[in-house]
Image: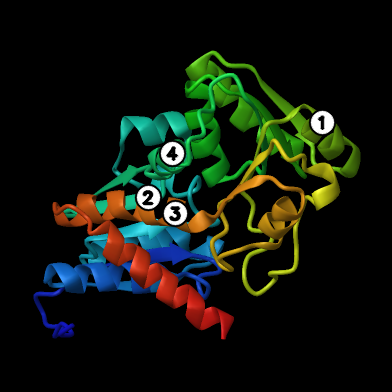
Amino acid sequence: MKSRQISGKTKLVGVMGDPIEHSVSPAMHNMALNAMGLDYVYVPFNVKKADLAKAVQAVRALNIRGLNVTIPHKVEIIPLLDDIDSLARAIGAVNVLVNNDGILKGYNTDAEGFLHVLLEHGVEPEGKNVVILGAGGAARAIAFTLAGRGANLIMLNRTPSNAAKCAADVSNATGQTVEVLTLDEKNLSDAMERGHILVNTTSVGMFPEKNDALVSSNLIRPHFIVADIVYNPYKTRLLIEAEKAGAMTINGLEMLIWQGALAFEKWTGKKAPLNVMRKGATQALKSYEK
C-alpha cells in the first residue's frame, strides 16, 4: 500500500489522553485513511490533566480537524467545548471532538460502539443485572446505554461519590434505578452473586500492568458475560480469569474499532473501512506482545 505524502494540505486528527503510549488508534486510523486515499494523518498527543485547557486551545490554533478523547479527559473536556451533541450531553462524557472552522463540538461514540458489540455477540442487556466497575467517562457512556436498554445496573467504584453522581444522571435520564457500592472485596462478591454481565471500564489491566485484574475467576460464574474495555493487551487478565470460569468474554478491541469508525466518519464524511481498521489495530497489538 502506497504511503501518503504529508503536505500543507494534510488534515490532522489524533487522540489525546494520559497515558497514551499504549494506544493502537494511530495504527488503526492511519491504515484506514491510507486505504481510503484520504489526505489525513492521525497522531497521539499525551496531555496531562493540568494542560487540558491549553490542549483544547491548540486544537483551534493548529486547525486540528478532530480528536479522540480518552482517559482521563472525557468528562473534564465538556465545559471547554463550544457545542455538545445531545447524546454526549445526556451521558456527560465526550470521546470525540470535531473542529468545524474553529467551532469545537463534542460527541460520544463509546455508547453506540459498546451496544453494537454486545448485540453482535448475541447479548441483549434488557432485564440483565450488569456489574460495572468504574465511574469515569467510559462508565457513564456504557451505563447510560445499558440502562436505556432496560438493564439493572450495579456500579462499584473506589470513590463512591463519583459513582453516585453518575448513577443519579443515568437514573434521571432513563428512569432506571442504579445501585452504587464502594469497590471492595465484600461488595464485589455480593454484586457478582446477583450479576449476569460484568463490564470493566477502569484502566486496571492495561499495558504495561497486564497482570492486574479487579475480579478473579472464583467470583465469576459460567453464565456470565464478561466485557473489558481495555484492549491492550488483547486478552486482559480479567478475560483470562473469566475464561477459567467458563464465561463468555468480549475484549475491548471491538469497542475501540466501532467507536473509532464512528469518529472516522464524523471527521472525514466517509464510511469507515471496518476490516482495515481491525487489521491495523490487531497488527499494532501484536507488536506489543513481542
Q: Residue at x 48, y 68 (%)?
A: 47
Q: Earlier in the sequence, mark 4 or mark 1?
A: 4
Q: Nearer the viewer, residue 264 or 233?
A: 233
Q: CA distance from mark 4 to mark 3?
A: 13 Å
Residue 58 shows in this picture: no
Q: Residue at x 71, y 51 (%)?
A: 242
Residue at which label 1 appears = 193
Q: Secondary structure at mark 4?
A: helix
Residue at which label 4 appears = 111
Q: CA distance from mark 1 to mark 3?
A: 27 Å
**Disc 4, disc 3: CB below 8 Å?**
no
Q: Residues within 10 Å of mark 1 (few under 14, many from 20)?
A: few
Q: Nearer the viewer, residue 229 or 100?
A: 229
**In this rendering, which labeled residue sits more in front, label 2 or label 1?**
1
Q: Secondary structure at mark 1?
A: helix
Q: CA distance from mark 2 to mark 1?
A: 31 Å
Give the farthest residue toward the right. 186
Q: Position of residue 179 (x, y in %)?
A: 71, 24
Q: CA distance from mark 4 to mark 2?
A: 8 Å
Q: Position of residue 84 (x, y in %)?
A: 32, 38
Looking at the image, residue 69 sits to the left or right of residue 235; the answer is left
Looking at the image, residue 257 sits to the left or right of residue 121; the answer is left
Where is 75 relative to 164, above or below? Answer: below
Q: Identify the amino acid type marked 1.
A: Glu
Residue at which label 2 appears = 259
Q: Identify the amino acid type marked 4.
A: Ala
Q: Earlier in the sequence, mark 3 or mark 2?
A: 3
